[in-house]
Amino acid sequence: MAIRLRTFQTGIATLDTRSAKPPPKTADPLYQSPEFRVWREIVIDRADRRCEQLIGNQRCAKAEPDHRMFADHIKEVRDGGARFDPDNGQCLCGSHHGAKTARERARRR
């Protein structure tokens, strides 16, 4: 016989006590443009739809369709990198793309 426990909601709302709330996140229009979508496909196709990050001497094994791939600007656009030059692009899996983005943000601070 299975015992079922019932839970009760408290009805207490979460209170946001921040004095300055961050603005809502919005996507840069660049990433919605037809030119970006073409560039993205070129970069990801060139990499055979597989992450190009090297781990030691081995290339990351993550690839589509099991993993989402990102077309990443090697030199970020805000740092002067070419927006739609395939030579400024690399295909990265989500974890490697997130790690690179975090490193670049920290470097800019």
Image: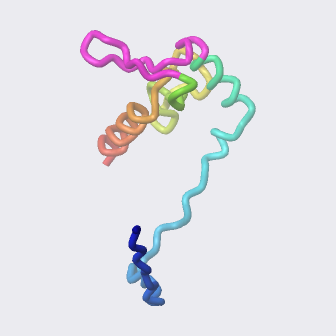
**Magenta-drawn stretch contains 61:** yes
Which residue appears at 42% of the width and 74% of the height? 4
Comparing 93 with 73, the one in front is 93
Which residue sits furthest bottom? 11
Q: Which span of residues is magenta-colored? A: 45-63
Q: Position of residue 46 (x, y in %)?
A: 57, 11
Q: Is residue 10 above or below residue 95?
A: below
Q: Residue visible at 36% across and 14% down?
A: 59
Left or right relative to 31: residue 70: left
Q: Position of residue 103 (x, y in %)?
A: 32, 38
Q: Position of residue 42 (x, y in %)?
A: 63, 17
Colour mapping: rainbow
Among the 4 quarters of the image, the one containing residue 55: top left
Residues 27 and 15: in front is: 15
Q: Residue furthest left?
A: 56
Q: Residue at x 61, y 47 (%)?
A: 28
- Image quadrant holding the N terminus, namely bottom left
8 w.r.t. 50: above or below: below
Which SS does the magenta portion mostly show? loop
* On screen, residue 58 above or below 5: above
Closer-to-camera residue (29/14): 14
Taking the spot 46% from the left edge, 29% from the top edge, the residue there is 93
Numbered-mark total: 0
- Seen in the picture, residue 79 relative to 47 is either above or below; the reply is below
Where residue 53 sits: x, y (%)? 38, 20
Is 72 left or right of 30, judged from the image as shown? left
